[in-house]
Amino acid sequence: MPDHVHVLTYGAALDADFTAFVKAFKQRSGYWYASRFGRRLWQAGYYDRILRSDEATEAVARYVLENPIRAGLARELGEYPFAGSGLYEPLALTSAWDRQT
């Protein structure tokens, strides 16, 4: 999305630190952006939500995948170039999305 980002993530270890993850993500991407465009990328703060079930996770994944469609940036799932996963192949994401249809 041009004006915000959705990230669905999970802690892979018991000592995973979400706050440190967000700080590092914003710091690294913000530095890259500022060095190229000469202005800040991120506002202070962020909104987070803890998901406690697989159903909730699939619903949120669907929301995130549909966001570019709702915004008029894509017509169908998989068309928006910045939507995807470092863990799941596009076919697996599509399957999860189809189960919610």
Image (cartoon, rainbow, N blue to C red):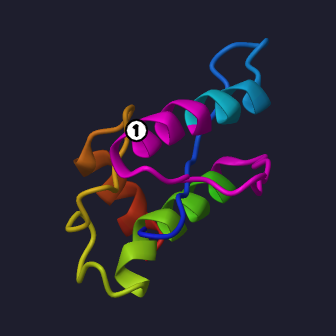
The total number of labels drawn is: 1
Three-letter code for the amino acid on which mark 1 is drawn:
Ser
Residue at horizontal 48 percent and vertical 38 percent from the top: 29
Residue at horizontal 37 percent and vertical 51 percent from the top: 37
Q: Examine the structure image and report whether residue 52 is included in the region drawn in magenta.
A: yes
Considering depth in this image, is 98 or 77 the residue closer to the camera?
A: 77
Q: Which residue is mark 1?
A: 35
Q: Give the quarter of the figure containing the C terminus.
A: bottom left
Residue 18 on image: x %, y % = 74, 30
Considering depth in this image, is 94 or 45 the residue closer to the camera?
A: 45
Residue at horizontal 77 percent and vertical 13 percent from the top: 14
Q: Examine the structure image and report whether residue 63 is included in the region drawn in magenta.
A: no
Residue at horizontal 64 percent and vertical 48 percent from the top: 54
Considering depth in this image, is 7 or 76 the residue closer to the camera?
A: 7
Label 1: which secondary element: helix
For residue 25, what is the image quadrant?
top right
When the figure is inspected, residue 79 is found, relative to residue 15, above or below; the finding is below
When the figure is inspected, residue 58 is found, relative to residue 15, above or below; the finding is below
Q: What is the span of residues highlighted in magenta in the rendered image?
A: 26-54
For residue 11, what is the image quadrant?
top right
Q: Is residue 84 left or right of residue 59?
A: left
Residue 61 on image: x %, y % = 52, 58
Q: Is residue 20 left or right of residue 71?
A: right
